[in-house]
Amino acid sequence: MQGLKYRRQVWHARELALLLAERLTSPALILLPIPLHWRRQSVRGFNQSDYLAEYLSQSLKEEVGVESQVLSKAIKRIKVTKTQMGLNRRQRLVNLKHAFSLSPRYLTRIQNQPHIALVDDVVTTGSTVAEVCLLLREQGVKRIDVYCICRASKPIS
């Protein structure tokens, strides 16, 4: 994951997505990558969750025969936040409060969907996905899965 995220070794995303696809028993048809703030993405040059979602969609089609759709611009990160690394659960929740919005352009494709999956590289406390889940629930999404590559241990507070 370090190579993908910090050393631009994006080819790792394909293998990781394939491993994930093989484990999904009833995959969502809509995949929403968790966004970086545009400034952070500009510095990094890419969003690893976008790569994971795109490769996951390809793997689901090739390996499982499931056609999924990646809506990479559906979630916007509207607030510049500190990096989550090193923050405890409470600090992470405060840091991410009102950090996301849904793009009006994609609302009709999201509203009242029976099943959507969020795609992220690492989940630690779940603060990021919890914040986005609130937005999706407000739009009537029935089931929200979280597809992540790594589940990090609880941060030290």
Image (tube, rainbow, N blue to C red):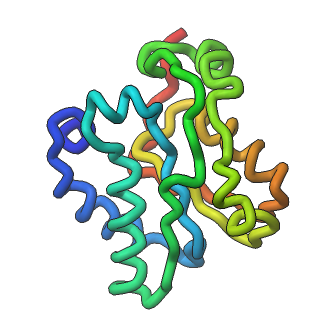
User: Vertically, is 133 above or below 157?
Assistant: below
Q: Position of residue 142 (x, y in %)?
A: 80, 64
Image quadrant holding the C terminus, namely top right
Left or right of 37? Residue 108 is right
Residue in the image at 37% along x and 65% along y: 54
Q: Is residue 70 above or below residue 153?
A: below
Q: Quadrant of the N terminus?
A: top left
Q: How many marks?
A: 0
Which residue is farthest front? 105
Q: Is residue 35 left or right of residue 10?
A: right
Q: Nearer the viewer, residue 83 or 102?
A: 102
Quadrant position of residue 45: top left
Residue in the picture at 58% in, 24% down: 79
Pinpoint residue 51: horizontal percent, then vertical percent.
33, 56
User: Residue at image x 58%, y 54%?
Assistant: 74
Q: Position of residue 56 (x, y in %)?
A: 39, 68
At 41% from the left and 72% from the top, the residue drawn is 57
Looking at the picture, tell me which residue is in the foreground, 11 or 19: 11
Front residue of this view, candidates 22 and 17: 17
Residue 82 versus residue 117 in the image, above or below: above
Residue 9: x and y in percent read 15, 47
Q: Residue furthest top?
A: 157
Q: Quadrant of residue 60?
A: bottom left
